[in-house]
Amino acid sequence: MRRKKTQSISSVIKEVLKQQDLNKGLLESRAVNYWEKVLGGAVARATHRIYIKDGVLYVEMTSSVLRNELMMWKDKIIINLNQAIGDNIVKDIVFR
């Protein structure tokens, strides 16, 4: 016999994460992990260190030329990262 109020496991997990306020950390880790997916391998190879804190993505670059190029595209990068993540997590990017 099937119950009327069944839910998929993924929806239950999402709800639990949201209730426990664990979802933010999960989405922030996605921002770091999706950096290469959104910007490509060449940019990822020039990225020395990347981390997120309070909605600000900090990216340390090995190339000053590439860093300046990415600064010009910062708004578009933020939009693309948030679309890949599925939520509005990244508010700003600081290139170093």
Image (tube, rainbow, N blue to C red):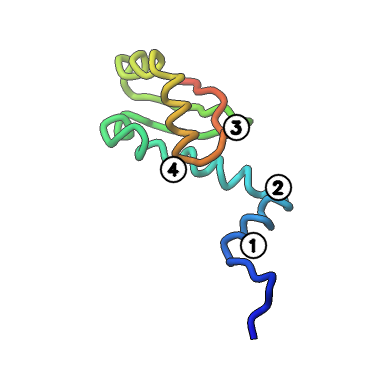
Q: Quadrant of residue 24?
A: top right
User: In the rendered structure, which disc, 2 or 4, sits on the residue that comes first in sequence?
Assistant: 2
User: In the rendered structure, which disc, 3 or 4, sits on the residue that comes first in sequence?
Assistant: 4
Comparing marks 2 and 4, which lies closer to the viewer? 2
Task: Describe the element under mark 2 as helix, strand or loop.
Answer: loop
Task: Bin the neighbour count of mark 4 within 10 Å (Cα to Cα): few under 14, some 14-19, many 20 and up.
Answer: some
Amino acid type at mark 3: Lys
Q: Residue furthest right?
A: 19
Task: Tell me the CA gap for discs 3 and 2.
Answer: 16 Å
User: In the rendered structure, which disc, 1 or 2, sits on the residue that comes first in sequence?
Assistant: 1
User: Which mark identifies residue 21?
Assistant: 2
Q: In the displayed structure, does residue 65 sit left or right of residue 56?
A: left
State the residue at coordinates (69%, 57%).
Answer: 16
Amino acid type at mark 1: Val
Quadrant of image for the N terminus: bottom right
Task: Bin the neighbour count of mark 2 within 10 Å (Cα to Cα): few under 14, some 14-19, many 20 and up.
Answer: few
Disc 3: which residue: 53
Task: Tell me the CA gap for discs 1 and 2.
Answer: 14 Å
Disc 1: which residue: 12
Task: Describe the element under mark 1 as helix, strand or loop.
Answer: helix
Amino acid type at mark 2: Asp
The x and y percentages for residue 88 are: 57, 33
User: In the rendered structure, which disc, 4 or 1, sits on the residue that comes first in sequence?
Assistant: 1
Q: Is residue 50 above or below residue 21?
A: above
Disc 4: which residue: 33
Task: Tell me the CA gap for discs 4 and 1.
Answer: 24 Å
Task: Describe the element under mark 3 as helix, strand or loop.
Answer: strand
